[in-house]
Amino acid sequence: MIRDIPPHYPPARPNLKAFRAPDKSQSKFFYLLWRIQMWVEGTFGLAVLEPWEKALLLMIFLITSILLVTGIIRFLPQHMLDVKGRVVYYLFGDGI
């Protein structure tokens, strides 16, 4: 224990407000959102990060997801046509 803490300082305690369930007066929807948030933070270890670290990590995840979805939407259809042409060539020996 640190002995140099001035006596007029309040006792140290963790702020657990972010981990408390919503009030019963709020809807079940908010309770469900809170449960999902707790599940995601607990599963991926986000509960131990500071708020700015969470924001940075979620922005990186969002940008990566946007790039992946954009690539799938823009390039996958043409790639599937190319693969179809190769499969037809290898199976039947005819080009399209």
Image (cartoon, rainbow, N blue to C red):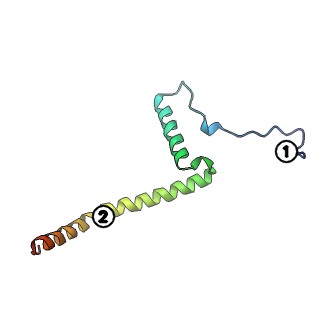
Label of residue 78 in the image = none
Between 92 and 38, the residue placed more toward the observer is 92
Q: Where is residue 8 in the image (x, y as percent from the top left)?
A: 88, 38
Q: Name the residue under label 1.
A: 1
State which tag comes first along the sequence, 1 or 2: 1
Between 1 and 54, the residue placed more toward the observer is 1
Report the label total. 2
Q: Residue at x 82, y 37 (%)?
A: 10
| Above or below, 52 relative to 29 | below
Q: Identity of the amino acid at label 2?
A: Arg
Seen as rendered, the residue at the extreme front is: 91
Q: Residue at x 36, y 61 (%)?
A: 70
Q: Distance between the residues labelled 1 and 2?
A: 60 Å
Q: Residue at x 51, y 42 (%)?
A: 39
Between 62 and 47, the residue placed more toward the observer is 47
Label of residue 74 in the image = 2
